[in-house]
Image (tube, rainbow, N blue to C red):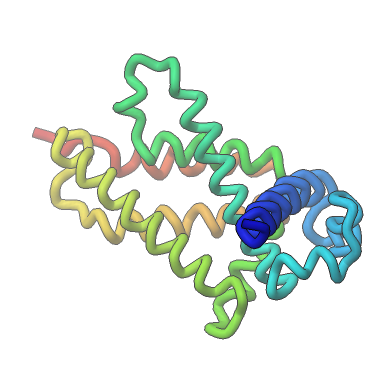
Amino acid sequence: MARRGSYAKGIAKREEILTAALEVIARNGYGRASVRELADAVGLSQAGLLHYFSSKEELFAEVLRKRDEVDREVLEADHADDPDADEVSLLDGFVGVVRHNAEVPGLVQLYARLSNEATAPDHAAHAFFEERFRMFRELAADDIRAGQQRGEIPADLDAERLASILLAVSDGLQTQWLMDPSIDMAAHIEYLIGLFARPAAP
């Protein structure tokens, strides 16, 4: 019984750490968010903080996983009172997430740096990004195919390739935006979706 309680406390502490880390990184930026600062935010030593994660890289990967979870909850809440909520597509939701990212530059910086480093197969965040990319491509492709069935997207377009292109454009825009914050990432994504989300001419 004590072991089960200890496990539950450990899970709760991890969630507390991740929530605090989201706030610290969003506020101060990834480059200035040290493990010491994250530990101080939850009343732990650096060693105590890393007790809950196998490495600093795993900690940051879990921070991004938590960000995805929070983004999903925000989008669901935004559409909860919408009578057409069931019809809100992943593509529409994606534009909203990209728009929100412009408000948390520290997390965008973390994502850009960690996704690049995680291309190494032995990196602690490699599996996270591999699964994240795969899931996005699958969901986006399914959404595109649904749009094709409704006649909103030309049927001769390759849904899987479009999904991969959408992901590549989004990640590339984040890098450009970090260099030049005047770039409107969400507007660019909307423009791209608008190019292919048009019915074929009769």
Q: Quadrant of the N terminus?
A: bottom right
Q: Quadrant of the C terminus?
A: top left
Where is residue 179? Give x, y as percent. 72, 55
Q: Where in the figure is residue 70, as x and y percent of width and height?
A: 58, 41
Quarter of the image where one finds residue 167: bottom left
Of residues 56 and 51, the one drawn nearer to the viewer in this rendering: 51
Examine the rendered structure and indicate whether residue 192 appears above or below residue 159. Answer: above
At 54% across and 74% down in the image, what residue appears?
126
Foreground of the two, 124 or 103: 124
Q: Is residue 201 left or right of residue 160?
A: left
Name the residue rendered at 64%, 59% in the picture.
Answer: 7
Q: Position of residue 59 (x, y in %)?
A: 70, 64
Q: Locate residue 66 relative to residue 154 in the image: left or right.
A: right
Comparing 178 with 19, the one in front is: 19
Against 118, residue 183 (above or below) is above
Of all residues, the one furthest to the left in this rendering is 202
Image height of 164 relative to 42, above or below: below
Res 4 quadrant in image: bottom right
Residue 78 image point, x, y percent: 50, 24
Residue positioned most to the front: 1
**Does the rendering let one see residue 70?**
yes
Q: Is residue 30 left or right of residue 5?
A: right
Picture mark count: 0
Residue 105 is at least partly visible in this image:
no
